[in-house]
């Protein structure tokens, strides 16, 4: 068991636990904070997978912006606390668990069947230069499209949320 | 490391996200669960990129785009939730069922 | 002119269609259309008859293929115009025309005036089809048309439930007979290989059809005649059919439809002649019928019912004639009867119109108030009673002569009827002469004699109604001439298989005997009823006889309890239940089932996004599993 794997396992456990707590916490703010932990562990995983730039972006945008946005949303909508209020009926939860478990089972089985023997080779981390080159040479169009999308989302959010 | 590790991790996060989407009543909680799912997808993309050693680093590029789109989506999503809250005084999504039979 | 014979039924049929569609908009409600059609037919019929009288006796055939059923088998739309058909054509068109004319005045003001004339035209067409048909299927078509028109016409005043019931009774009773008739048609078809009457007669004559088959087939065919012509035991519908308007009673239930049964036997006479069994059966049934109906006529208070029972009795006379080999006697009586019975009904209609009642207890003394009606009625009544020299005398005496010859006399060569049956026929015939004259006298005195017992102001009928009466009276008076001389009716209707017996042969002793009986009965009737209505009917003094007669020999009760209750009480509700619950239930159930399914399925659209998402993910999992399991391997 290489060091890489050990590190990954630790991060995976933390992240998985945090993910479970996100969806089962009684307190909304607690759930948001657990989300922070989960997202951070994902960033760590990115580092292990030789994608440092993605990891940074993950922290900045996800943890930094999105979670803050969510916290604002919680504040503005005065979400109540208490399990009874946050979750659906036990029957719905059971159904949701079944669906989730089903999805997990399906994914695991298929992935194990397809990539059970594959290994990730050790290599150097991807440089930002290489990433930049790829984006602005090969994926310029999607890049521009995404920026347009962000503009639209910006304007849309403002329009939707303003008070008339 | 075996490719399966990050893939299973991603699958687990995804399933947790699915559970959250289906089981949570608060709209903001549902959005959070959606974020979990998107993150799982990203992990998948980056893991495959590392496995395939792509010249174009397309896995990471796509992960960046997904992050951007997720940000946009959360923004709009929260705006909508805010609007619903203003109109109906509630963020319970079972109470937003006008398109029923 | 014989080629145009097909126009005779076609014109009234066309008139029916025209009146039905546009009658209400035509002047006088469409009645002139019907009159014109039958008048045109009358002209053609008289021309054909004059040809026949002049000597053109060959049967004329014309046919058009109507329903090809297979190789070598087809049902033609064909006609046979021979002497018998010519005579009947002339009779039917004459009577129908006069009655339609009468109806213009009698039915004036009726709210269903137009429909009435439409129905009359359709009916006339039906009877003419029967007369001309050259195959049994076409005959059946005309037969059934008449049956259904009879139903419609009897039920003309359907607002009164009793009239509707009478119409249904008529239809269903004749239907029972028709079942036998249809069976008979198929027996002969199977035996002779064709529906055509000529083929069947050939088959019988040539002996290629076994005598058992002939008997069975003839008996079955006669069932239809029993129903249509009101013979025992299917006679019960005729008296009730008087619920219809009087012109209907005159046309259908005196002159034409009920004569169709007799016509059927006459048309297929070689077939009937070949079987002694069926001739005996006809003779017995005819004898029973003529006696019981004459007895029943004696105790009726409704003038139309007297005439109805009288019709049944006279039809039995015709059947009796046919049963003892008197082909031309039977046909002649048919023609004579048509005239004087139609006359009696129409005159009775004038009386009813004047006193607004059918009940003879409210009549009386009308001879002074309605002289023309009285005179014509008298002529018809005396013809009915068989008083010389009116038409009825000649025809009735021919029948009695034939019966005497077959039973007591030297016998008739080749006649298959047994002597005993012929003797029974003769005796019944003579007794009926007495009874007939008796009820005729009763009817005459109660209606026209003594003093008026009613409450209204009876007055003579209008010229429009009197004209047909006078014409018919002339026919009833002088019709006897048809049977006399070398060129008599029997030569007109003769065929190679049924050679003419020559003019009416008269047995002087018989003439004296029957006349004496008739006159005696008339005298008795006069004596009993001269002063009008007795406080108690004479027969009431014999309670058992009275009860039996009042209950019409319990036949109606028998049918009611036996058949009607079983069918209407048990079979009909069961069928209704089956139809409602099972058949309709299946149809309704399909609709209801779909609705229930929809009601259940609509919960899928709950409006809850999470439910949709769950379904989505489950679907993905499902598809993935299915695809990889089924396709991947």
Image (cartoon, rainbow, N blue to C red):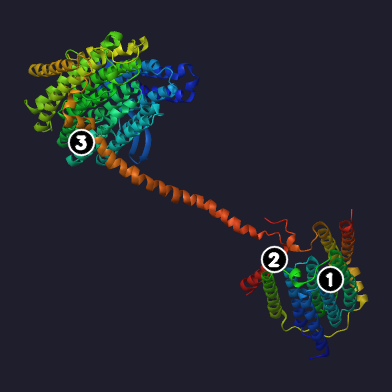
Q: State which mark lies toward you, 3 or 2.
A: 2
| Left or right: C463 in relation to B49 | left
Q: Residues within 10 Å of mark 1 (few under 14, many from 20)?
A: some
Q: Nearer the viewer, residue C562 or C458?
A: C458
Q: State which mark lies toward you, 2 or 1.
A: 2
> Which chain's residue wears label 3?
C
Q: Residues within 10 Å of mark 2 (few under 14, many from 20)?
A: few
Mark 1 lies on residue = B62
Residue C571 can be seen in this image: yes
Q: Residues within 10 Å of mark 3 (few under 14, many from 20)?
A: many
Mark 3 lies on residue = C204
Disc 1 to disc 3: CB gap under 8 Å: no
Judge if badges 2 and 1 mark residues of a common chain. no
- Give how far across and how far down residue C610 sits, in percent: 72, 65
Question: Compared to C51, does B101 lie above or below?
Answer: below
Q: Secondary structure at mark 3?
A: helix
Quarter occupied by the N terminus of chain B: bottom right
- Give how far across and how far down residue A26 sits, in percent: 78, 74
| Residue sitting farthest toward the front | C535
> Which chain's residue wears label 2?
C
Q: CA separation, marks 2 and 1? A: 25 Å
Disc 3 to disc 2: CB gap under 8 Å: no
Q: Nearer the viewer, residue C582 or C491?
A: C582
| Left or right: A9 in relation to C148 | right
């Amino acid at each position: 068991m290489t060091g890489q794997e050990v590190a990954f396992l630790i991060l995976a456990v933390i992240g998985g636990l945090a993910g479970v707590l996100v969806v089962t916490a009684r307190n909304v703010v607690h759930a948001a904070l657990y989300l922070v932990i989960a997202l951070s562990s994902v960033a760590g995983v990115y580092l292990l997978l030789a994608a440092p730039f993605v990891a940074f972006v993950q922290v900045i945008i996800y943890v930094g912006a999105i979670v803050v946005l969510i916290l604002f949303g919680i504040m503005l909508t005065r979400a109540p606390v208490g399990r009874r209020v946050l979750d659906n009926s036990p029957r719905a939860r059971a159904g949701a668990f079944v669906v989730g478990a089903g999805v997990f089972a399906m994914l695991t089985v298929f992935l194990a069947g397809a990539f059970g023997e594959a290994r990730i080779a050790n290599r150097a981390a991807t440089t930002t230069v290489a990433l930049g080159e790829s984006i602005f040479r090969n994926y310029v169009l999607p890049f521009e499209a995404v920026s347009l999308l962000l503009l639209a989302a910006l304007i849309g959010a403002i329009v939707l949320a303003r008070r008339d | 490391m075996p490719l399966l590790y990050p893939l299973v991790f991603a699958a687990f996060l995804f399933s947790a996200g699915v559970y959250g989407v289906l089981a949570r009543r608060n709209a903001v909680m549902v959005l959070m669960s959606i974020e979990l799912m998107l993150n799982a997808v990203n992990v998948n993309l980056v893991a495959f990129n590392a496995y395939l050693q792509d010249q174009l680093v397309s896995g990471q590029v796509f992960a960046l785009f997904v992050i951007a789109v997720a940000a946009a989506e959360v923004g709009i999503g929260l705006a909508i939730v805010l609007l619903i809250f203003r109109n109906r005084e509630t963020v319970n999504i079972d109470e937003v069922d006008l398109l029923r039979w | 002119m014989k080629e145009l014979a097909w126009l005779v039924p076609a014109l009234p049929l066309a008139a029916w269609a025209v009146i039905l569609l546009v009658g209400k908009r035509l002047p006088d409600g469409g009645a002139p259309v019907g009159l014109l059609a039958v008048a045109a037919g009358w002209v053609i019929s008289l021309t054909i008859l004059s040809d026949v009288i002049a000597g053109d006796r060959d049967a004329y055939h014309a046919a058009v293929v109507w329903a090809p059923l297979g190789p070598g088998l087809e049902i033609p739309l064909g006609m046979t115009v021979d002497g018998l058909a010519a005579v009947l054509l002339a009779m039917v068109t004459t009577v129908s025309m006069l009655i339609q004319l009468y109806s213009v005045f009698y039915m004036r003001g009726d709210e269903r005036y137009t429909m009435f004339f439409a129905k009359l035209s359709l009916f006339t067409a039906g009877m003419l089809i029967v007369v001309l048909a050259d195959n049994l299927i076409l005959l059946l078509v005309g037969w059934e048309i008449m049956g259904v028109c009879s139903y419609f016409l009897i039920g003309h005043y359907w607002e009164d439930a009793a009239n509707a019931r009478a119409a249904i009774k008529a239809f269903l009773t004749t239907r029972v007979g028709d079942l036998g008739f249809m069976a008979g048609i198929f027996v002969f078809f199977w035996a002779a290989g064709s529906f055509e009457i000529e083929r069947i007669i050939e088959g019988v004559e040539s002996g290629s059809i076994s005598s058992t088959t002939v008997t069975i087939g003839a008996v079955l065919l006669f069932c239809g005649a029993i129903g249509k012509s009101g013979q025992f035991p299917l006679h019960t519908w005729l008296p009730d059919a008087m619920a219809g308007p009087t012109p209907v009673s005159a046309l259908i239930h005196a002159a034409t439809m009920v004569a169709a049964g007799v016509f059927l036997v006459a048309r297929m006479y070689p077939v009937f002649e070949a079987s002694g069994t069926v001739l005996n059966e006809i003779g017995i049934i005819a004898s029973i019928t003529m006696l019981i109906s004459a007895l029943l006529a004696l105790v009726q208070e409704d003038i139309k019912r007297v005439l109805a029972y009288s019709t049944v009795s006279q039809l039995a006379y015709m059947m009796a004639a046919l049963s003892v080999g008197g082909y031309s006697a039977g046909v002649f009586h048919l023609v004579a009867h048509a005239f004087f019975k139609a006359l009696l009904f129409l005159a009775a209609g004038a009386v009813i119109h004047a006193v607004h009642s059918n009940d003879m207890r409210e009549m009386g003394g009308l001879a002074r108030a309605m002289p023309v009606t009285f005179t014509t009625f008298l002529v018809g009544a005396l013809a009915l009673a068989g008083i010389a020299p009116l038409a009825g005398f000649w025809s009735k005496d021919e029948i009695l002569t034939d019966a005497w010859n077959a039973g007591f006399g030297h016998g008739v060569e080749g006649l298959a009827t047994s002597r005993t049956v012929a003797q029974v026929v003769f005796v019944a015939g003579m007794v009926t002469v007495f009874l007939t004259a008796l009820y005729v006298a009763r009817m005459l005195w109660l209606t026209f004699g003594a003093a008026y017992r009613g409450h209204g102001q009876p007055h003579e009928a209008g010229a429009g109604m009197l004209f047909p009466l006078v014409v018919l009276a002339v026919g009833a008076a002088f019709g006897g001439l048809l049977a006399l001389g070398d060129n008599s009716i029997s030569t007109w209707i003769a065929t190679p298989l049924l050679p003419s017996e020559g003019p009416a042969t008269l047995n002087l002793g018989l003439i004296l005997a029957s006349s004496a009986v008739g006159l005696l009965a008339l005298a008795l009737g006069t004596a009993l009823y001269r002063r009008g209505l007795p406080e108690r009917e004479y027969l009431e003094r014999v309670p058992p006889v009275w009860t039996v007669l009042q209950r019409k020999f319990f036949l109606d009760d028998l049918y009611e309890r036996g058949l009607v209750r079983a069918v209407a009480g048990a079979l009909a509700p069961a069928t209704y239940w089956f139809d409602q619950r099972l058949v309709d239930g299946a149809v309704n159930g399909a609709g209801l089932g779909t609705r229930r399914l929809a009601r259940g399925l609509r919960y899928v659209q709950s409006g809850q996004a999470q439910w949709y998402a769950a379904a989505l993910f489950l679907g993905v999992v499902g598809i993935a599993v299915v695809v990889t399991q089924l396709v991947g391997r």
